[in-house]
Amino acid sequence: MSEKTTALDGKIAEKSGGEVRLWTRDFILIIAINFLVFINHIMILSTFPFYVEKLGGTAAIAGLAATVFSLIAVICRPFIGWMLDNGKRKAILIVGLCGLALAPAGYLAVPVLSVALVFRMIHGASLACSNTTSSTIATDIIPKARFAEGMGMFGMATALATAIAPALGLFLMDRGYMILFLSATGIAIVALVLYLFLHTPAIEASSKPLNLKALVNPDAVPASTIMLVFMLTFGALENFLAKYAQVSGLPSGGLFFAIMAAMLLLVRVTLGKVVDQRGEGIFVYTCNAAMAAAFLLLAFAPGTVTFLLAAVLAGYGFGGLEPALQSMAVHIASPESRGSANSTFLCAYDIGIGLGGGLAGVLITTAGYNQMFAVLAIANAVSLILYLVWGRKHPSSFNRK
């Protein structure tokens, strides 16, 4: 577990056959750890509305749970970024993985709605520790010359977990909540075991004092804001798509997310190289359009064919945009500020999912599922406008190379 690996500009720049190596052992390990982190997180996120209903709650309460989860993650992330920039990478990762193991066991041990919300906050803080750290370690490891490509591969595992986990969670839930929650705990334990074999580049700690203004990285703000607005739609999907499919007599939510996963794989294979060569703009334009189209199909033309088409479109939308914008958010950050850059982006990610889930819950309760999808499609237009008038002109944009 030594952290004495030599790195140039915080990156491993090993060469093989004249090319900078991307696929090192440690890069594979950090991808695997982050994959398991998101499997643990999303398999509970997508099934929690069912669990809330079992405990006597409503869709609005399920939405509140999503908001509370994200709120605590957002509160924690800036401080986590500061600690990461002060060299506490591996300690924070251990804390996060332990929390991801504890929270699902807590849901099982005390099946009371109010207690479940408390454990959702523990789960949110643990996710903030785990994936902020894993993202920062990934940016330490990826060679500068293949940065967007590397972030695309790292993001492929994350997004693939995001697409696979709902189907897995629903499958396990059908076999009982004990199986679901114990499986989530076991997945976090496997991630802890993988951590034991991880070596990270030595990064000089900045030893900077806590400064509330410095907790947000200004260079990451444009990409983060654009992502936040986009994630309003994805937050609604992750929290309520399976429930929508059930009450509307459509194919299962598990099938929807499985199709999303297949589309994500297709997108992520080439995404990084495209961003390195052409910039993130192509994904901001097309991914927002694809997600908006998916929501409009769900709102105005619900049916088996359109349901499956919406899954393809949503898979492309999320699969393309998230790593493109994360690359934009962190690629000009210095090694000593990558923690705050990642935490700024992931705060926006969490806020978007939390607000999207909360807003979706309120809209479903007051107006119904179809109206919820129609209203939230507006978020994609706003995300696109923000990029056009602000993001593409910022120094962090790859399009300004």
Image (tube, rainbow, N blue to C red):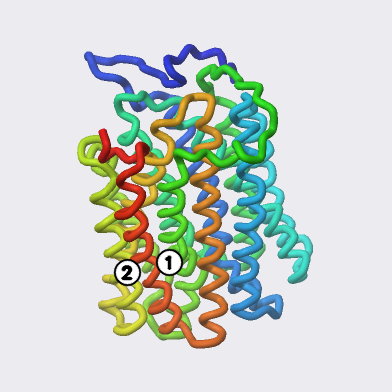
- Quarter of the image for residue 288 reads bottom left
Question: Which class describes the residues within 10 Å of circle 1: few (<14), some (14-19), or many (20+)?
Answer: many
Q: Position of residue 113 (x, y in %)?
A: 74, 71
| Amino acid type of the residue tagged 2 in the rendering | Ala
The residue lying at 50 percent from left, 77 percent from top is 243
Q: Secondary structure at mark 2?
A: helix
- Residue in view at x 65 percent, y 32 percent: 83
Q: Nearer the viewer, residue 185 or 296?
A: 296
Residue 3 lies, with reference to residue 331, above or below; the image says: above
Q: Secondary structure at mark 1?
A: helix
Of residues 362 and 268, which is closer to you in this image? 362
Q: Quadrant of residue 395?
A: top left
Q: Name above or below for residue 76 compared with residue 21.
A: below
Horizontally, residue 159 falls left or right of residue 198, namely left
Q: Are marks 2 and 1 in contact (CB under 8 Å)?
A: yes
User: In the image, is 97 to the left or to the right of 328?
Assistant: right
The tag on residue 233 is 1
